[in-house]
Amino acid sequence: MPASGSLALSDACGIDVMTREQLTDERVERAMDVARAAGEEGLAVAAYLGDDLIIDTWSGLADSDVGTPVTADTLFQVFSVTKAFTATALHLLADRGLVDYDLPIARYWPEFGVRGKERITVRDALCHRAGIPQMPVGVTVERMGDWSWMTEQIANFRPWFPAGTVNAYHVLVWGWLIGEVIQRTDPEKRDVATFVADEVCAPLGITDFHMPLADEHVGRVTQLKADWQVQLDPDHLRNAAQPVEVSPAPPVHNQRATWQMSLPGAGGIANAPSVARLFAMLAQRGTFHGTRLLSEEIIEACRRPRPDSLADDLIFEAPAWIGQGGYWLGGDLRRRIPADGSLPLVLNQPGAGGSTGWAELDTGLAVAICHNRQFVVDRKDPHFQARITPIADAVREVAAERA
């Protein structure tokens, strides 16, 4: 049976900061218990069916070291789920005729067009085929937060692979590639974080997606844990793409300094309903609560797989079902979506360690699952099942009944 209740939350001074109903179903709660028994610590799940919020629930510990529970006020780091927000921002500019996916990035960012990068297109970057998956040599947490330093270094890169020839997930550098194009083409010249807030979040009523995080929200962020210890990757390419010094894992992302950077590829901090609202817009082919954010043509184009989609992505050493619009073509971290983008129609964005959001265009269902204990996602194993898989299945069961 569905359950709901009103929760009033207080900040450290005892002042009520927000009230939100918990909307759930016993099947989802059981699935969350299963996930926690398998190793999860804190979880938040939200789902929309069309415009209707059908699941908004949370469970477990925000900080297992001191026993702090997850509440309605808790925020989670969502890592590469952030890319869905940034990609949407770029698609807005394309919809407005300000960006052409098939033009070279150098058309918008002239300094970029040197040392063999002249032919890299916006589309190449969006779908992780730009041939420059590496982070700058000498990058540190402090330098990662310096937008000018990062973009100057990237503009001086030599490609590891010719443009548009190799699938190699641009784990972190993607954020500056796409973010700089956004900043260069926005008529108001806003930074990427402001553009996302103004043009993506505000029209959709998204109030708890933060990039960067303001001081007043610092106490709401979960303590991140992981099932592994960060160490040097023996594979030179993967190590270059996510160096130990800035790896999307606890040593870097439990730092307040990291939370307060603009990292449009992996730095978003949010609650589950805010992430789910973005995917609800995608699930309804560009609209949400009467607001059209993207055209149906843009959404349909995003369903097209990137070239050579059956070939291994060199970062994952397995195929990665990524569409030409930057979103992935599969949901809940499982490899069930055909490379040709056929049914079911799913746009997804996973994040490091298992966070995810996805939109089902054939059912209108949009789901976000946030958590604070990262697990290993094995894309080389076709039978891989994530700890959050039972939650995804339970949400789909509830949605099918509601539909």
Image (cartoon, rainbow, N blue to C red):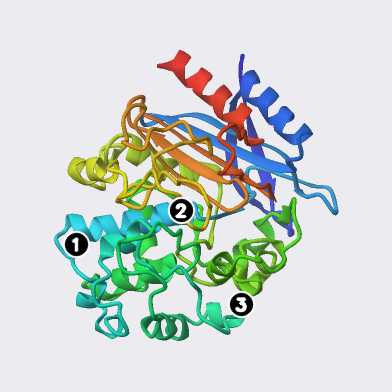
For mark 2, does the 10 Å Cα neighbourhood hold few (<14), some (14 to 19), or many (20 or more) residues? many
Q: Nearer the viewer, residue 101 or 232?
A: 232
- Circles 2 and 3 in contact, beta carbons < 8 Å: no
For mark 3, does the 10 Å Cα neighbourhood hold few (<14), some (14 to 19), or many (20 or more) residues?
A: some
Q: Name the quadrant containing residue 119.
A: bottom left
The kind of residue on which mark 2 rests is Asp
Give the image quarter of residue 296. Answer: top left
Q: Is residue 316 left or right of residue 324?
A: right
Q: State how far apart marks 3 and 1 are (Cα).
A: 33 Å
Question: What residue did someone put label 3 on?
Answer: 141
Q: Residue at x 76, y 60 (%)?
A: 229
Query: Where's the C terminus, which quadrant?
Result: top left
Q: Is residue 66 left or right of residue 139?
A: right
Q: Secondary structure at mark 2?
A: loop
The correct choice, above or below, for 190 with respect to 249 in the image is below
Q: Residue furthest right?
A: 66
Rendered location of residue 253, percent (x, y): 65, 65
Q: Image point 85% across, 53% down: which residue?
A: 66
> x, y (%) of residue 231?
72, 66
Q: Which mark is residue 102?
A: 1
Q: Which is in the foreground here, disc 2 or disc 3?
A: 2
For mark 2, what is the residue? Answer: 313
First along the sequence among labels 2 and 3: 3
Q: Quadrant of the N terminus?
A: top right
Q: Choose mark 2 or mark 1, whichever is in front.
A: 2
Tell me if mark 1 has few (under 14), some (14-19) or many (20+) residues whose alpha carbon lies within 10 angstroms of its own.
Answer: few
Q: Position of residue 259 (x, y in %)?
A: 59, 67
Q: Are marks 2 and 1 in contact (CB under 8 Å)?
A: no
